[in-house]
Image (tube, coloured by chain):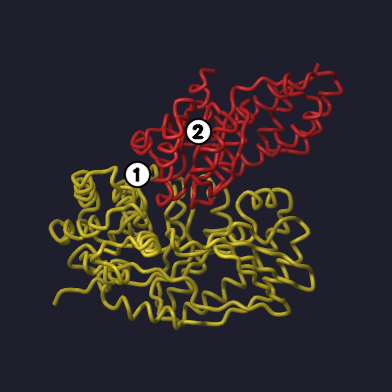
Amino acid sequence: MAMTEKQRILAAARKQPVDKLPVGARIDVWYNYHSGHDTLPEKYKGWGIPDILCDQGAGIQLRHGAIWRTEYRDTEVVVHEDPPYTTTEYKTPKGTVSKKTMFTPQEGPWMPYELELPFKSVDDYPVIEHLLENTVLIPYLDDYLKKVEMVGENGVVVAPDSYSPMQEIMRTIMGYERFFFELHDYPSRVEHLYELMKEVVWQKLKILAESPVETPEVCGNWSDDIHTPVFRKYFTPWFQEVGEFLHLKGKLTQAHIDGEMRRLIPMFLETGIDVAEAWSPAPMTSVTTAELREAWGDKVTIWGGVPAILFEPQYSDEEFDEYVKHLLKEIAPGYNFILGMGDNLAFDGKIERVGRMAELVDKYGRLPI
Amino acid sequence: MFDYSTLIQAVVGGNHIRSVELASEALKDGVSPQDIVGSGLQAGMRIVGDKFSAGDFFVPEMLLASRAVTRAMEVLQPHICAADMPTLGRVVIGTVFGDIHDIGKNLLAMFLRGAGFEVFDLGINITTDSFVGAVKEYAPAILGMSALITTTMPTMGDVIKALEVAELRSRVKIIVGGAPVTQHFTEYIGADGYGADGGSAIKLCRNLVGK
């Protein structure tokens, strides 16, 4: 009996034999935009992502954020909604900080973007420390499980949207620019936040360990020009420790590698992370899939490989086909690889090319290639 | 005589406290602000740009160097009047609509200022109309657009079309950049140039203004 797409994706993640190259396609940006503008193709109006991808013959990658709810002890959280903006104030005995996010799903995004982050000056250290010391995460799986049921055997739900402790500080507390200034000017204060953030992220990991998520996403959104200087000190040991813990619980670890990875390639191998998802090769980054495979061998399962821009009208169908066929040759014999776009279908991407990708795999993707 | 190498070193080393001290010292020694900028700060930023392009420096070093220049410029600004500081040209930059990523754009702005361009940074999530309005208002030599995600890249083409409709296209050179942007895409939308990183973007801008 043929494997289901879910079985193929999980087997490839676990470096087990599969019959055919798995396909895990991600189209939430395209879907959100066209749903929001009522411009879905006539055939797909009223359909959800899983049904559209099934119709295209592709396996499904559906995203899910957190499988927990966040509460803060001894803190008043005040939310002001002014769509598409949300301002959240955190009023603590040590002072108040606020953040501002923008969420425009009708333009494509599947999650809010941070416009203003809570840390703005050295005066905010005590407030952020209080928040981290008093963060309580409570498991909440209902929405995740609904998505799992919706996807069924046709793919997987990737969760959560989570980061390593230092990446959390960089992205959600300070922002990259401020982070590097603070790390330079007040290293011991940043390191103290790091220790506190570790405890918060450990709460997430313990929830994940007891959850049905098979390959938790433990970090991502790296770019080698930003993260290389801090990776070995703050990221590598963390992932090694986390990997050991999650492996003992029968899980794999996964990272979302959608940025320029060239100088991070050897460091990634040191982390022990099992799956590198959202792989976006040249021309979107400087690294080809062949280079990545050569560097990592069969130690890391790669998920992605077809650059998102290949789905756009600037490239012809013939160029698209040639790219995918060439990619299949690059990854031969094709084990430990899950085909997908790097890393989403853009709003002007051609949905038919998702089906084209699946057809090319049917034709040329039986393993071993 | 003022030793510019110390100021260059402060910039390259990202030492904003030292760059301020040295800029003040140079002024006291009677060095002209233009020379402090040209032979000290800009010279330092050129080295930083070259090191970044060579892969020896990363974004953190660039940020710290840019801060060292910015803080030193704050000391020098009261001593400079607009006429005394010739610029290489005026540049308007922004991140396109729907995109709020700005670190690359911010670095480019710092680099361009350090290199001698006059920069108007529109910020993030800039609509097509705002880009067109800025070209009308500032009459820049160069318009720079940044996008970090493929989903927002197509709006760069919309801005170019809007400039054509407004009969402004021929008056401005357009450069694009950001992680997903490629030379292929640049030619597809009809932009004039593409900068893969800050260092190459500076060279591109200099070429486009003929300096």
Q: How many other residues sit within 10 Å of disc 2, few (<14), some (14-19) or many (≥20)?
A: few
Q: Nearer the viewer, mark 1 or mark 2?
A: 1
Q: Quick one: which residue is furthest to the front in this view?
A: B166
Q: How many other residues sit within 10 Å of disc 1, few (<14), some (14-19) or many (≥20)?
A: some
- Residue displayed at 29% across by 78% down: A152
Q: Position of residue B200 (x, y in %)?
A: 49, 30
Residue A125 is marked as none
Q: Chain of mark 1?
A: A
| Local SS, label 2 | loop
Q: Colour of chain A?
A: yellow
Residue A202 quadrant: bottom right
Q: Determine which residue is flagged by label 2.
A: B54
Q: Determine which residue is flagged by label 1.
A: A282
Residues behind callouts 1 and 2 on a single chain = no
| Local SS, label 1 | loop
- Residue displayed at 70% across by 80% down: A73
Please state which amino acid type lies under the numbered disc 1: Ala
Picture layout, residue A139 above or below residue A321? below
Residue B76 quadrant: top right
Q: Quick one: which residue is furthest to the top in this view?
A: B1
Label 1–label 2 contact, CB within 8 A: no
Q: In the picture provided, is A289 more to the left or to the right than B160? A: left
Q: Chain of mark 2?
A: B
Q: Position of residue A33 (x, y in %)?
A: 39, 60
Please state which amino acid type lies under the numbered disc 2: Ala
Q: In the picture provided, is B71 more to the left or to the right than A242? A: right
Picture layout, residue B188 above or below residue A123? above
> What is the count of numbered marks?
2
Q: Colour of chain B?
A: red
